[in-house]
Image: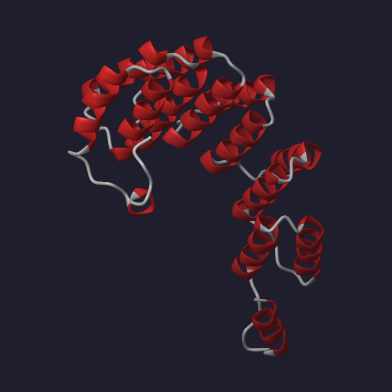
């Protein structure tokens, strides 16, 4: 990547642009090489390449993965100050980062702000909330997410419900976990291999063999993903 970038810099007919900058920043950010990412950002700006919203989202994501919430907040403030509108991606990155850090107060503030700005949450947003509440041992808060879902028109997918099943499994809320299957049926969303496998794991840990047997039968009716084919059912 670096050698290609050097070739571009040497070729006057193929100058780097904002897309070049974003790709470079994402590469170093994903590797956790934050200082290198920041030096590249400065060099690109010095050369006259201006950032866009995607650039700032990449910086936010990189700082979030590095648990540098001070720099995350600084980027978000900069975006507001210079009129780079926060997008659904901006909110999702920030909500997920603060949720993983256990800062539920900031996560919930951003979720409220998102809704006040009339930006519609996605399944990615909701999964971040559910995972954060599960790690914080707050099943009642997950109930709040489901109430929000009932009063919204967010299009739900199997990934969200699998996140929900996993959260209830971790919390030991097996009754609530079982109810997820009924909610999926109501929403017209079919369980998949991961749904059943997670539930089998939960029931097996509690010695609930009749439930395990029933789910194993259902498991045979769905396609096993390639990355799951060499794993046991629980």
Residue 123 in sight: yes
Residue 84 vs 226, above or below: the answer is: above
Which quadrant would residue 25 be assigned to in this image? Answer: bottom right
Front-lying residue, 78 or 154: 154
Q: Which residue is found at the position 58% from the left and 36% from the top?
A: 91
Q: Position of residue 57 (x, y in %)?
A: 63, 48
Q: Position of residue 60 (x, y in %)?
A: 68, 46
In the rendered picture of this protein, how many numbered marks are placed on residues?
A: 0
Name the quarter where the N terminus is drawn.
bottom right
Residue 156 in sight: no
Colour style of the rendered protein structure:
secondary structure
Name the quarter where the C terminus is drawn.
top left
Residue 122 vs 179, above or below: the answer is: below
Report the side of 23 relative to 144 (left or right). right
Front-lying residue, 177 or 184: 177
Q: Position of residue 182 (x, y in %)?
A: 25, 18
Front-lying residue, 199 or 44: 199
Q: Which residue is found at the position 59% from the left and 24% from the top?
A: 135
Q: Which residue is found at the position 50% from the left and 25% from the top?
A: 130
Residue 120 vs 170, above or below: the answer is: below
Which quadrant would residue 106 be assigned to in this image? Answer: top right
Q: Which residue is found at the position 82% from the left and 63% from the top?
A: 39
Q: Position of residue 183 (x, y in %)?
A: 28, 19
């Amino acid at each position: 990547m670096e050698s290609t970038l050097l070739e571009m810099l040497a070729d006057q007919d193929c100058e780097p642009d904002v897309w070049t900058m974003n790709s470079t920043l994402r590469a170093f950010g994903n590797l956790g090489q934050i200082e290198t990412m920041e030096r590249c950002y400065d060099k690109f700006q010095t050369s006259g390449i201006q950032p866009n919203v995607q650039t700032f989202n990449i910086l936010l994501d990189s700082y979030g993965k590095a648990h540098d919430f001070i720099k995350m907040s600084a980027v978000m403030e900069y975006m507001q100050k210079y009129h780079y509108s926060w997008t659904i991606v901006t909110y999702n990155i920030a909500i997920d980062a603060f949720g993983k850090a256990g800062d539920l107060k900031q996560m919930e503030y951003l979720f409220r702000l998102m809704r006040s700005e009339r930006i519609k949450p996605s399944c990615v947003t909701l999964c971040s909330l559910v995972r954060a509440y599960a790690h914080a041992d707050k099943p009642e808060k997950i109930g709040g997410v489901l109430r929000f879902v009932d009063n919204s028109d967010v299009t739900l997918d199997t990934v969200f419900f699998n996140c929900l099943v996993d959260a209830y499994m971790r919390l030991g809320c097996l009754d609530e976990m079982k109810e997820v299957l009924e909610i999926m049926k109501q929403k017209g969303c079919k369980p998949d291999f991961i749904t059943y496998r997670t539930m089998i794991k939960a029931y097996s840990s509690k010695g609930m063999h009749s439930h395990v047997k029933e789910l194993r039968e259902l498991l045979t009716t769905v396609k096993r993903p390639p990355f799951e084919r060499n794993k046991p059912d629980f």
